[in-house]
Image (cartoon, rainbow, N blue to C red):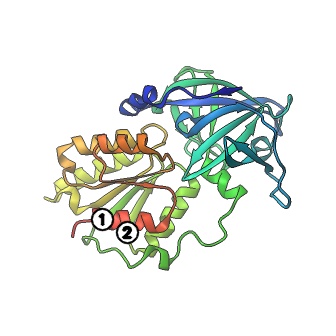
Amino acid sequence: MKTAPRDIDARSPLTGNNQFELLLFRLGADSALGQSELFGINVFKIREIVAMPSITPIAGASAYSLGVVNLRGQIIPVLDLPAIVGCKPKTGLNIMLVTEYARTTQAFAVESVEDIVRLDWKQVLSAEASGTSGKLVTSIARLDGNTDGSRLAQVLDVEAILQLVSPPEDNQVDAQKVGPRLVMKPGTIILAADDSFVARSLIEQELQLLHAPFEMVKSGQEAWDRLNALAIQAAAEGKTVLDKVAAVLTDLEMPEMDGFTLTRHIKQDARFQGLPVIIHSSLSGSANEHHVRSVGADGYVAKFVAEDLADAIRRVLPA
């Protein structure tokens, strides 16, 4: 049995309305209360959903690895997602989610798939902002809107999960990889937005090595609010926002406001004319690159390669 998510072309218009689709699934009983909670992953990350096939165990693999599968000629590693997040399946590992993420393909074993729901990013709150502990959850989705007692789903931080399961063998960010320091207009910063703790840490390391002043926020809404505050401050000083901000670096998937909407707001506002925007995302593929161009972004970099990100920033900075 094979079940593919909805056609990507049918989902593409959602990016123009600050909306997305979330695949809901269950992993079994949690260690705290013994309840089976809902978890979610953005449908854009899902390549396909299949019934659990025969898995070949790999000698010496990590504790979270179930082995590999041969899916139409491609060898794909399969990870035990319940074990990673601390759940125990009640009915076994029945479904495999094949994901494309940050230039890699991997599969996650789950207990069951519940539904695909369409949400506005305003229905999604940062896990850190809501006081939620745990670095494997990036945000909390309110499935029934803003009503009291609404159903909640935990949106997993796939970056953090892959970092936990397969830590890189070498340092992802070092001075040799990122190259010489950036040349920026005095008094300007790079404003960076990403909801993933792991991504923010890597970006911060890189910008520090580049000797680039920066501010880091956790959502598109925070970035938009900060830009507006800087624009007001610049106007009061008889300057423009380009005297305050050299470039904006934004993720795509973020609570409250996604990177597509943030970029479109910036490009349609006369106050920010000439302000370069780079989208830095784990959502790769030609469809997403087309959307990036359609909202007017100046660059698109798939996560996470330090050299690529540094090159993209250099390309958009004013001479």
Identified at 57% across, 48% down, the residue is: 101
Q: Is residue 183 above or below residue 242?
A: below
Q: Is residue 234 left or right of residue 111?
A: left
Classify mark 1: residues with Cα within 10 Å, few (<14), some (14-19) or many (20+): few
Residue 38 in sight in this render: no
Q: What is the number of the mark on residue 265?
A: none
Q: Is residue 116 above or below residue 314?
A: above
Identified at 55% across, 44% down, the residue is: 129
Task: Place residue 54 in its image quadrant.
Answer: top right
Most extreme residue toward the left is 238
Counting residues from the start of the chain, the first of labels 2 and 1 encountered is: 2
Closer to viewer: mark 2 or mark 1: 1
Q: Are marks 2 and 1 in contact (CB under 8 Å)?
A: no
Q: Is residue 16 left or right of residue 155?
A: left
Identified at 67% across, 51% down, the residue is: 161
Identified at 54% across, 57% down, the residue is: 199
Residue kind at label 1, given as amino acid type: Arg
Residue kind at label 2, given as amino acid type: Pro
Q: CA distance from mark 2 to mark 1?
A: 17 Å
The residue to which callout 1 is attached is 315
Q: Position of residue 11 (x, y in %)?
A: 45, 28
Along the viewing direction, whichever of 3 and 317 lies nearer the viewer: 3
- The quadrant in which the C terminus is found is bottom left
Classify mark 2: residues with Cα within 10 Å, few (<14), some (14-19) or many (20+): some
Q: Secondary structure at mark 2?
A: loop
The residue to which callout 2 is attached is 213
Q: Position of residue 306 (x, y in %)?
A: 48, 67
Q: Position of residue 229 (x, y in %)?
A: 29, 50
Most extreme residue toward the front is 73
Q: Is residue 148 left or right of residue 241?
A: right
- The quadrant in which the N terminus is found is top right
Task: Place residue 141 in its image quadrant.
Answer: top right
